């Protein structure tokens, strides 16, 4: 039975999981202010020690490929590449927002993960997950106003029953959304509102079966925007 190692480091959350085709075998998730370079590999060692699973039994490594924190994505990618090279395993680039949307399921509501991208912008996408994850609008970096306008336009074409927001952008923009989005909407509860490596691994397993893998050399995070340093260099 295939086993996938999932690594999530796109934002403040650090998460590592091992899943097979039937169950999440182990998952270790923290949402605390430590750098991912301090947490990811010790967390992996912990679940390996707790379960007794050999890394040699893993079939592939699924990595949260962005968008998100530039530093977090680089650390996650470097960790996955190092493990992939050491274990001779393929990597799977899983869009971070797709995996976040997987938190909400069996609903006709639109699912809108929002990650705070600073400067009144969000990393976001628009999804449905009534009978399987459906990507309506893929990962994008837009202003919160552009996102709300997109939702209004979608409602004009096909009335929306409800929209569920989740992610670290919710605390930043919740009041603004409540005041400016005149459509039925709600916010995911605390246990469903952040990234999880098990979601990365589950989507990674599906992609692995379709042959959507990369070598360690081919793996590149998807930033969507230039880093602050690159923006300042361009302006200079």
Image: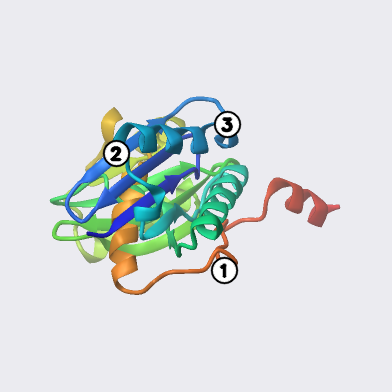
Q: Is residue 28 above or below residue 150?
A: above
Seen in the image, is 143 located left or right of residue 26?
Answer: right
* Residue 166 placement: quadrant: top left
Q: Residue at x 30, y 60 (%)?
A: 205
Residue 97 screen position, x and y as percent: 40, 52
Tell me if 85 is positioned left or right of 146 in this view: right
Secondary structure found at label 3: helix
* Residue corresponding to mark 3: 38
**Disc 2 to disc 1, how far (Cα)?**
28 Å
Q: Residue at x 55, y 63 (%)?
A: 216
Residue 30 is situated, as x and y percent measured from the top left of the image, at 42, 29
Residue lying farthest right? Answer: 236
Quickly name the residue at label 2: 26
User: Is the C-beta separation of discs 1 and 3 under 8 Å?
Assistant: no
The answer to which of marks 2 and 3 sits earlier in the sequence is 2
Foreground mark, 2 or 1, reads 2
Q: How far, Cα to Cα, is label 2 from label 3?
A: 20 Å
Residue at the location (23% across, 57% down)?
128
On the question of residue 152 being in view, the answer is no
Mark closer to the chain start, 2 or 1: 2
For this view, does 39 lie left or right of residue 61?
right
Instruction: Say which residue label 1 marks.
Output: 218
Q: How much space separates mark 1 and mark 3, taking CA atoms? A: 25 Å
Q: Position of residue 7 (x, y in %)?
A: 43, 47
The local secondary structure at tag 2 comes to strand
């Amino acid at each position: 039975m295939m086993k996938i190692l999932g690594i999530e480091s796109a934002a403040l959350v650090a998460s590592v999981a091992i899943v097979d085709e039937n169950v999440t075998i182990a998952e270790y998730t923290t949402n605390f202010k430590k750098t991912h370079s301090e947490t990811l590999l010790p967390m992996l060692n912990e679940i390996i020690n707790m379960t007794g699973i050999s890394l040699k039994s893993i079939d592939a490594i699924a990595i949260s490929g962005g968008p998100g924190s530039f530093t977090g994505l680089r650390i996650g990618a470097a960790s996955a590449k190092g493990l992939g090279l050491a274990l001779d395993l393929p990597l799977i680039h899983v869009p971070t927002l797709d995996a976040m949307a997987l938190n909400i399921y069996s609903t006709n509501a639109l699912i809108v993960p929002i990650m705070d991208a600073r400067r009144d912008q969000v990393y976001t996408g628009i999804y449905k997950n009534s009978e399987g994850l459906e990507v309506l609008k893929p990962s994008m970096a837009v202003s919160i106003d552009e996102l709300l306008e997109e939702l209004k336009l979608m409602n004009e074409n096909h009335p929306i029953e409800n929209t569920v927001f989740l992610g670290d952008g919710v605390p930043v923009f919740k009041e603004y959304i409540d005041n400016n989005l005149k459509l039925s909407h709600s916010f995911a509860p605390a246990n469903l509102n952040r990234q999880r490596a098990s979601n990365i691994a589950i989507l990674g397993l599906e992609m692995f079966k379709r042959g959507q893998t990369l070598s360690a050399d081919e793996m590149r995070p998807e930033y969507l925007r230039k880093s602050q340093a690159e923006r300042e260099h361009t302006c200079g």
